[in-house]
Amino acid sequence: MEGGRAHYVTCCSTTDSVESWRGGRRDGGVLIDIETDAIIADGLSMPHSPRVMGEAIYFLESGRGALVRLDRKSGRREDVTFCPGFARGLTFVGHYAILTISLPRIAAFNGLAVAEQMRARGATPWRGLLIVDLRNGDIVEWWRLEGDVTELFDVGVIENIRSPRGLGPHSSELAEAMRGEEM
């Protein structure tokens, strides 16, 4: 989104037949400027969540485990940081990126660069949130999730909230909040 309108989208493939994108998971993805209908980045591995920030477009290359910055003027791409999981959701607060990482589905990392990076780094995938300093690519904070949750698809920030709470879909607290009762 830019200026309240959709501006950039990602696709895992440029093919148009059912499930044909799976053959291009490693490098068949693209970033498209939908105002001009132009592909502005190609050769991407399962790109997700394009976001505009200043003169850059940030996006996640899930198949490589990377947060990527693309300069809109020059087209130059650079990896900001490595993500130890399948990255999908992305938002910003100041000069920080907040992104989600998920566990792979069965054999989902097979044949992807993220699996090679994990092996090279001696890492195992996990799920949670990463807070990345965009000035240097450092992961300055993280929150790891355990239990039944295996995938996270997006993240958002609610400003000026001092004590946030998570309410389960079947909790009495949620029912009370929906009725407008004080918790």
Image (spheres, grey):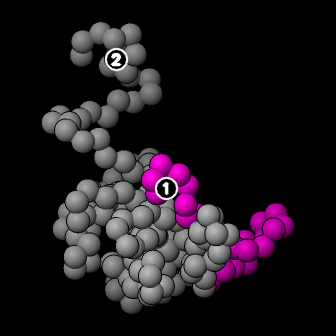
User: Looking at the image, is mark 1 or mark 2 earlier in the sequence?
Assistant: 1
Compared across the picture, whether 135 is left or right of 146 comes to left
- Residue 10, percent from left and from top: 59, 67
- Residue 153, percent from left and from top: 48, 53
Q: Residue furthest right?
A: 17
Q: Is residue 125 above or below residue 92?
A: below
User: Which residue: 22% across, 60% down?
Assistant: 94
Residue under numbered circle 2: 177
| Secondary-structure class at tag 1 | loop
Separation (CA) of disc 1 from disc 2: 31 Å
User: Which residue: 26% across, 72% down?
Assistant: 134
Number of other residues with Cα within 10 Å of mark 1, as a class: few under 14, some 14 to 19, many 20 or more: few
Residue 90 in view, yes or no:
yes
Residue under numbered circle 1: 1
Query: Along the line of sight, which residue is nearer the eye, 159 or 48?
Result: 159
The image quarter containing residue 26 is: bottom right
Number of other residues with Cα within 10 Å of mark 2, as a class: few under 14, some 14 to 19, many 20 or more: few
Query: Along the line of sight, which residue is nearer the eye, 19 or 161?
Result: 161
The image quarter containing residue 17 is: bottom right
The image quarter containing residue 101 is: bottom left
- Tell whether position 64 is magenta: no
| Secondary-structure class at tag 2 | helix
Looking at the rendered image, the quarter that the C terminus falls into is: top left
Query: Where are the magenta residues, as a range?
Result: 1-30
- Residue 79, percent from left and from top: 38, 82
- Number of numbered callouts drawn: 2
- Tell whether position 26 is magenta: yes
Q: Are marks 1 and 2 in contact (CB under 8 Å)?
A: no
Q: Nearer the viewer, mark 1 or mark 2?
A: 1
Give amino acid for label 2.
Ala
Give amino acid for label 1.
Met
User: Which residue: 58% across, 73% down?
Assistant: 31
